[in-house]
Image (cartoon, helix red, strand yellow):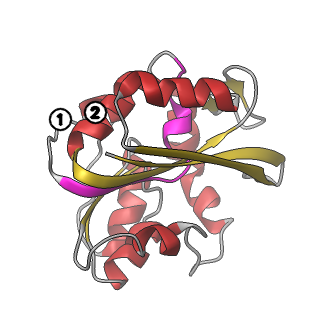
Amino acid sequence: MDGRTLEFYETRGKEWAEAHPPDSYGRELDSFLDRLPPGATILELGCGDGRDAERMIARGFTVLASDGSPGMATLASERLGRAVPVMRFAELEATDAFDAAWCQSSLLHAGEAELPGILARVHRALRRGGWHWASYKGGHGGGRDAFGRFFSYLPRDRLEAAYRTAADWAELVIVSGRGHSFGGAPTTWHNVLARK
């Protein structure tokens, strides 16, 4: 996460969180969780205010939620009632430790050149057969939104290439569609489901 992106989440993180209904969570989350065995261990990178982690915990999963922004980690800690560590993607060192890795609108803040290395870390952190889900904004090359946040804005073929460069995934599916971003801007989204 670059400095301007971090500054947004440090100074406007509460505003970002309040733009979502208080009891909402990722709309693809439940179908992802349905793939996992009861009590599975889930890594969440970029947990934001902890809304998705809260849902995972409510469904009986063991969750390690983390965020690269200290301010967002604090919001998540308050929501979950437990400490949420500050961890940047490049600091992930786990090996064969998780049944799943959930990355809702988080890895898209990494530059295209950084992404394969980060995905290799995610792959290494998963146990064999473990599932990974992530969402990315589509486009044609990195840039900033109206709020100064950096996004990789990858076209689908280059996103797939980043995954295939990172690791030998047993399954890899990318589904694209239209949606919105913070502030209401229409956005193309690529949702990735992969299995180690």
User: Residue 194, percent across and down?
Assistant: 44, 47
Question: In the image, which disc is placed on residue 196?
Answer: none
Residue 92 horizontal side relative to residue 119, left or right: left
Q: Residue furthest front?
A: 170
Residue 100 horizontal side relative to residue 124, left or right: right
Label 1 crowding class (10 Å Cα cut-off): few <14, some 14-19, many 20+? Answer: few
Question: In the image, which disc is placed on residue 93?
Answer: 1
User: Quarter holding the C terminus?
Assistant: top left
Pointers 1 and 2 in contact (C-beta within 8 Å) = yes
In the image, residue 36 sits, relative to residue 118, either above or below, namely below
* Closer-to-camera residue (159/46): 159
In the image, residue 27 sits, relative to residue 195, either above or below, namely below
Start-end of magenta stretch? 98-112
User: Residue 110, percent across and down?
Assistant: 50, 28
Q: Residue at x 66, y 21 (%)?
A: 142
Q: Quadrant of residue 118?
A: top left
Q: Residue at x 15, y 51 (%)?
A: 97
At mark 1, the secondary structure is loop
* Closer-to-camera residue (176/12): 176
User: Residue 32, percent across and down?
Assistant: 46, 67
Callout 2, which amino acid? Arg
Residue 67 horizontal side relative to residue 42, left or right: right
Question: In the image, which disc is placed on residue 121?
Answer: 2
Callout 1, which amino acid? Glu
Q: Residue at x 54, y 33 (%)?
A: 109
* Closer-to-camera residue (69/126): 126
Q: CA distance from mark 1 to mark 2?
A: 7 Å
